[in-house]
Amino acid sequence: MELTRSRSARALVIHLEDTRNPEKANIMNVPVNFRSVDIPAELQSCFAAQRAAYLAAPEPSYDQRIADLKALGQLLKDNKDELVAAINADYGNRSEFETLFAEYFVVLETIADARKNLKKWMKPQRRHVDFMTYPLARNRVIPQPLGVVGVIVPWNFPLNLSFCPLAAILAAGNRAMVKMSENSRALAEVLIRVSPKYFPLEKLAFFEDGGGRGPAFSSLPFDHLLFTGSGATGRAVMANAARNLTPVTLELGGKAPAIVGPDFPVKTAAERILWVKMFNAGQICTNVDYMFLPKGGEDEFVHHCRKLFAERFPDINGQDYTSIIDEPSFTRLQATLDDARTKGAVLVNLAERQIPDTKQRKFPPHLVLNPTDDMIVMQREIFGPILPIKTYTDRQEVADYINSHDRPLAIYPFTSDAELRDFYISRVMSGGVSVNEALLHVGQHDLPFGGIGASGMGHYHAREGFNTFSKLRPVFYQGPLSPIQMLFQPPYAGRPMSILRTMIKWKT
């Protein structure tokens, strides 16, 4: 069955009315329950069509999945310039290098990695057979498609955070509905227009935000739902999904700290941390949200940051420095700085000799020295080019501080001391870790990515992404002989009980 957007609001809505009324025949035999939520007809009809297509062909072959991954990559290659231009339009100014590097290139690498490993990922796993069912029995774990997967995409890396999950979703043999952010309207328009050339809508469909699609999308009875965004929205998404018992993967962000050890060169730390903090103007969920510096190292760190920023961004209004996504975010960042200044923090403007173009929402990067916990800058994720710097004298105070707050999406220890490195890895729990660098663990194709606690739940990327979007189905194959049938049938007195007692004795 083929679904087009022109018919979705008419013919399939009639069917969906039938699915709500058990007395009417379900012409597609699709068990769909929307639980009386006010869901736009376009979402309902697409979901029903994808569910029907899944039931008609529940387990795509290896060749079909490879073809889907190739089509996903071809969509990107054929429309590269238009996709890059759309992201730039949504931002006002988005560094072309950052889009090509962190979105286009990373997605192509992710698709290539899935194609390379798919045969291995799909292979049933052998598992040991318990003594009670031996001999000649077999155990297998068979990864099978879940069905219809929903993806809710944020605006900060909209291509990366839609297509990287899609690589895993399609590799696992699923169908997908993808809702883009309200701040990604230009990109959403391009994807909605071009994607049907590569995929039928009953396999992959994109939707823009608006028209009640936000909360309604997470209320659809998906077989799995992936959300990337803020913790507050993540809680609402999870509550909506819970009504359908839809399992969720949440990537939520938070306040990820960098910790510069006393042995680590301050200049090198400044180079690596500043690169991440300026990338995408700091609008990254795994960015360094704040940092710990050995007491007394502030002046040297500030000196290197000033020098580095002047070299890397001689003109803040140039195309290499990305804009803040919208006016409310720009205003929020300015209010965050004003709050810190009012409460006694020392602010260092790294672009103090430049005049930023506020119409382009170019926000000058700032260091905030010795912030306190009553400041907004230390109470919520910053999501911008502001870097609070706390000083410390003892590693335990660093661990205690981080552990007294929500578990972060990442920690970034900078040290050549293996014992100190392992101290932070073992004593401070986070979603992931990059050592002597920030952020780069996220781009490793053979590492899972995910948060913990308030920073999220579940994983994708690598084999873990394939597993997340698969049902790892346990299958037991009985052999020609069945010890249970031969030895443990009632009446239990006598031989069955004697054998059982002997077996218990062996185990104790």
Image (cartoon, grey):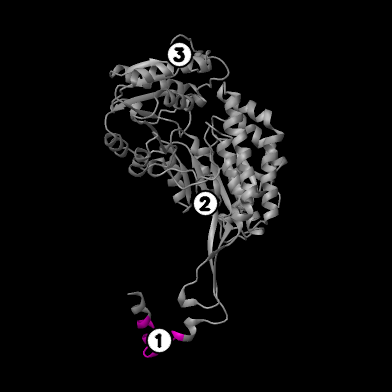
Nearer to us in this view, 438 or 65: 438
Q: Position of residue 354 (x, y in %)?
A: 48, 10
Mark with earlier residue (3, 1): 3
Mark with earlier residue (3, 2): 3
Closer to the eye: label 3 or 2: 3
Amino acid identity at mark 2: Thr
Left or right: 258 as drawn, with respect to 98: left
Q: Position of residue 41 (x, y in %)?
A: 59, 44
The local crowd at label 3, few if under 14, some if 14 to 19, many if 20 or more residues have their Cα within 10 Å, is some
Magenta segment includes 499:
yes
Mark with earlier residue (2, 1): 2
Whole-Å distance between the Cαs marked 2 and 1? 42 Å
Going 54% across and 75% down the picture, which residue do you hit? 137
Question: Of the numbered discs in the image, which one, if any, rests on residue 147?
Answer: none
Q: Position of residue 73 (x, y in %)?
A: 67, 40
86 versus 476 height, above or below? above
Residue under label 1, please give it.
496
426 versus 79 height, above or below? below
Left or right: 495 as drawn, with respect to 215: left
Whole-Å distance between the Cαs marked 3 and 2? 44 Å
Going 54% across and 31% down the picture, which residue do you hit? 182
Residue under label 3, please give it.
351
Number of marks in picture: 3
Instruction: Answer whether labels 2 and 1 touch (C-beta < 8 Å).
Output: no
**Where on the picture, by quarter, is residue 61?**
bottom right
Closer to the eye: label 2 or 1: 1
Magenta segment includes 28:
no
Instruction: Answer whether labels 3 and 2 touch (C-beta < 8 Å).
Output: no
Q: Which residues are magenta?
A: 487-502
Residue under label 2, please give it.
468
**Where on the picture, by quarter, is residue 400?**
top left
Going 54% across and 82% down the picture, which residue do you hit? 481
